[in-house]
Image (cartoon, rainbow, N blue to C red):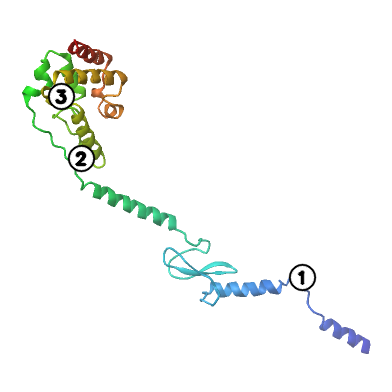
Amino acid sequence: MDSLAQHSWRINIAPPSLENVPPLESLARSVRCGADRAGPVEQPGRRSIRWADGGRGYFTKCGVRKCRGGVSPDSRRPGGGTVGKRLMQAAVVLVVIFAAAQLIRPQRANPPIDPSRTLQAHMGTTNGLVAIVDRACRDCHSNATVWPWYSQVAPLSWLMASGVAEGRKALNFSEWGSYSPERQRELLAAVCRDGSSGKMPGRPWTQLHPEARLSSTDIETICATAQQADR
């Protein structure tokens, strides 16, 4: 009986199987994670983060937990939304700069024209050069510039105003009579040379104004007039 009682006592106090019991470290981790899910509080040594929407959270052993402010899932990375915010700021800056640029209005006035000084008055209406100049060179090399709509929008307005000013300074067919005969011959030779090489009227201008392109017949007419004036 004593041995039987002893055997029964041993069976009753035998420890349970530990095969399905999780390690103590896992249990402790679950407890900590549960506390974080319930709402982590700021503790000394716990590194905090702040989301772009004003929310604040902390790094824990269970990942990043958000405890107050904003709406963000646990998987959200710290600093999320910074790139989008910077792009928005850059767009606002560009809009402000573009709007401010419109306040700078370059001069687009056409000086008065004296008909007696024009190329037409000195060459006659029958000369083919006059019609070519009026079609392809008028806007940049005369006082009869036609300012298109984009000449009122910066920065294109600045480019065109600068190009017209430089063009009139180099050659102004509205002031043809003010040039000496020698200077007129030099200018006609330059027009022939630049037209033959394709330098003038210029590719950007002809893309916007296809009618300003010089055909081979136009170039022959210009060069023929230059040769006649040089004799």
* Residue 8 drawn above or below residue 179: below
Q: Which residue is mark 3?
A: 173
| x, y percent for residue 106 | 19, 41
Of residues 155 and 22, the one nearer the viewer is 155
Q: Which residue is mark 1?
A: 19
Q: Amino acid at mark 3?
A: Phe
Looking at the figure, which quarter contains the C terminus? Answer: top left
Is residue 70 found left or right of 220 in the rendered image?
A: right
Q: Amino acid at mark 2?
A: Gln
Quadrant of the image occupied by residue 125: top left
Of residues 40 and 163, the one nearer the viewer is 163
Element marked by disc 2: helix
Cα distance in 3D space between marks 1 and 3: 103 Å
Looking at the figure, which quarter contains the N terminus? Answer: bottom right
Say which residue appears at 82% left-offset and 83% top-offset: 12
- Mark 1 or mark 3: whose residue is earlier in sequence: 1
| x, y percent for residue 15 | 80, 79
Cα distance in 3D space between marks 2 and 3: 25 Å
Q: Which residue is mark 2?
A: 152
Say which residue appears at 18% left-offset and 16% top-offset: 129
